[in-house]
Image: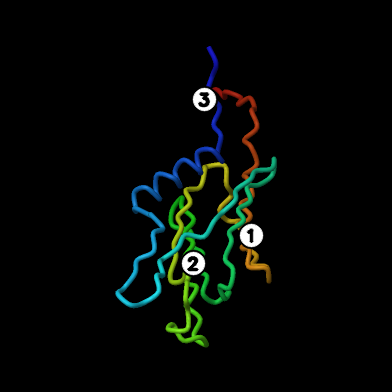
């Protein structure tokens, strides 16, 4: 019989999908009468794993670094922020708005293999947030000597 091996990336993705379903993240633009459609949005994320770490790449184009909030809440990584609608262009000038603006929030459950004290985040000029989640050192098997009283 084949044993099931714990796969942190697959678990992380499954939990994220369930969270998105729970919060009803449809991504469908809402339109107010006479105004172009805009919507809250969910930035895309790629997650990959190496032997030493889990890396998340989150697309946040045109989001200012000061509008990005990243926090740890128990075993969850919470990413929040905002991409405001361009203030320098009047809304009535737009014929079509297909890019999403407004606030966003993503919640990622962390597997127990992540060393939460060592998490790093770097924001590139290209608008990609790179979150590095180093793995804990695996616990080595060892013998424990039994002492006599």
Is disc 1 placed on a helix, strand or loop? strand
Spatial distance from mark 2 to mark 3, Cα to Cα?
A: 75 Å
Which residue is at 41% across, 66% downward?
40
State the residue in front, 13 or 28: 28
Mark with earlier residue (3, 1): 1
Spatial distance from mark 3 to mark 1, Cα to Cα?
A: 54 Å
State the residue in front, 118 or 124: 124
Label 2 neighbour load within 10 Å: few <14, some 14-19, many 20+: few
Residue underneath mark 3: 149
Is disc 2 placed on a helix, strand or loop? loop
Left or right: residue 60 versus residue 106 is right
Q: Residue furthest front?
A: 95
Task: From the top left corner, tell me how far across and down residue 141 is, in percent.
Answer: 64, 28
State the residue in front, 28 or 42: 28
- The mark closer to the camera, 1 or 2, is 2
Q: Quadrant of residue 29?
A: bottom left
Label 1 neighbour load within 10 Å: few <14, some 14-19, many 20+: some
Spatial distance from mark 1 to mark 2, Cα to Cα?
A: 25 Å
Q: Residue furthest top?
A: 1
Mark with earlier residue (2, 3): 2
Task: From the top left corner, tell me how far across and down residue 46 is, in percent.
Answer: 60, 51
Task: From the top left corner, tell me how far across and down residue 123 is, in percent.
Answer: 64, 67
> How are the colours assigned in the image?
rainbow
Mark with earlier residue (1, 2): 2
Task: From the top left corner, tell me how far across and down residue 126 is, in percent.
Answer: 67, 68
Residue underneath mark 2: 98
Which residue is at 51% across, 43% downward?
12
Q: Residue furthest left?
A: 33
Residue underneath mark 1: 130
- The mark closer to the camera, 3 or 1, is 1
């Amino acid at each position: 019989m084949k044993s099931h091996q714990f796969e942190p990336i697959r678990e992380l993705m499954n939990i994220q999908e369930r969270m998105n379903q729970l919060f009803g993240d449809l991504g469908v633009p809402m339109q107010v009468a006479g105004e172009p459609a805009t919507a809250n949005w969910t930035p895309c994320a790629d997650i990959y794993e190496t032997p030493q770490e889990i890396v998340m790449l989150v697309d946040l184009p045109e989001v200012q670094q000061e509008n990005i909030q990243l926090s740890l809440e128990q075993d969850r990584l919470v990413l929040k922020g905002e991409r405001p609608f361009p203030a320098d262009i009047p809304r009535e000038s737009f014929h079509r708005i297909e890019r999403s603006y407004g606030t966003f929030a993503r919640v990622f459950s962390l597997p127990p293999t992540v060393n939460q004290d060592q998490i790093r985040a770097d924001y590139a000029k290209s608008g990609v947030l790179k979150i590095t989640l180093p793995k804990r050192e695996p616990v080595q098997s060892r013998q424990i000597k039994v002492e006599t009283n």
